[in-house]
Image: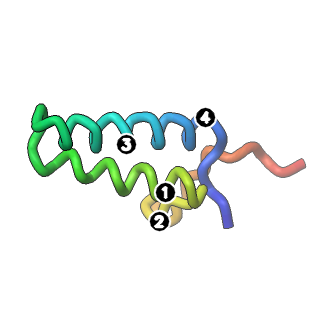
């Protein structure tokens, strides 16, 4: 079941990619690898944390 909408997906993938890229460059430390979580959840359109708290950014069903 998807719980991540389009804008949320785009934001997650972009921010996650920037974090990983900055880690490769040595600008930020190992915490930048957390960007991989953002990338994976954005690509899968599912966030376990959203599920736990009952939150969705997908459009409402009609």
Of residues 21 and 52, the one nearer the viewer is 21
User: Can you say whether 45 is above or below 19 in the image?
Assistant: below
Residue at (50% x, 59% y) in the render? 47
Horizontal side of 23 relative to 20 (left or right) equals: left
Q: Position of residue 48 (x, y in %)?
A: 47, 65
x and y, in percent, of residue 22 in the image: 22, 35
Kindly state the secondary structure of the residue where label 4 is placed.
helix
SS at mark 2 in the image = helix
Q: Residue 16 carries which label?
A: 3
Image position, residue 28 (x, y; %): 12, 37
Crowdedness near tag 2: few (<14), some (14–19) or many (≥20) residues, C-alpha within 10 Å: few
Is there a contact, CB below 8 Å, between mark 4 and mark 1?
no
Mark 4 sits on what residue? 7
**Real-space CA distance between mark 4 and mark 3, rounded to the nearest whole angstrom:** 14 Å
> Relative to residue 15, is residue 2 depicted above or below?
below
Q: Residue at x 57, y 60 (%)?
A: 44
Asked whether 50 or 24 is in front, the reply is 24
Distance in Å between CA atoms under marks 2 and 1: 8 Å
User: Which badge, 4 or 1, comes first in the chain's sequence?
Assistant: 4
Q: In this view, does 60 lie above or below 11?
A: below
Q: Mark 2 points at which residue?
A: 48
């Amino acid at each position: 079941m998807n719980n991540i909408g389009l804008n949320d997906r785009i934001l997650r993938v972009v921010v996650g990619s920037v974090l990983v890229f900055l880690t490769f460059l040595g600008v930020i430390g190992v915490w930048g690898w957390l960007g991989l979580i953002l990338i994976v959840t954005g690509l899968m359109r599912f966030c376990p944390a959203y599920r736990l708290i009952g939150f969705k950014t997908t459009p409402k069903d009609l």
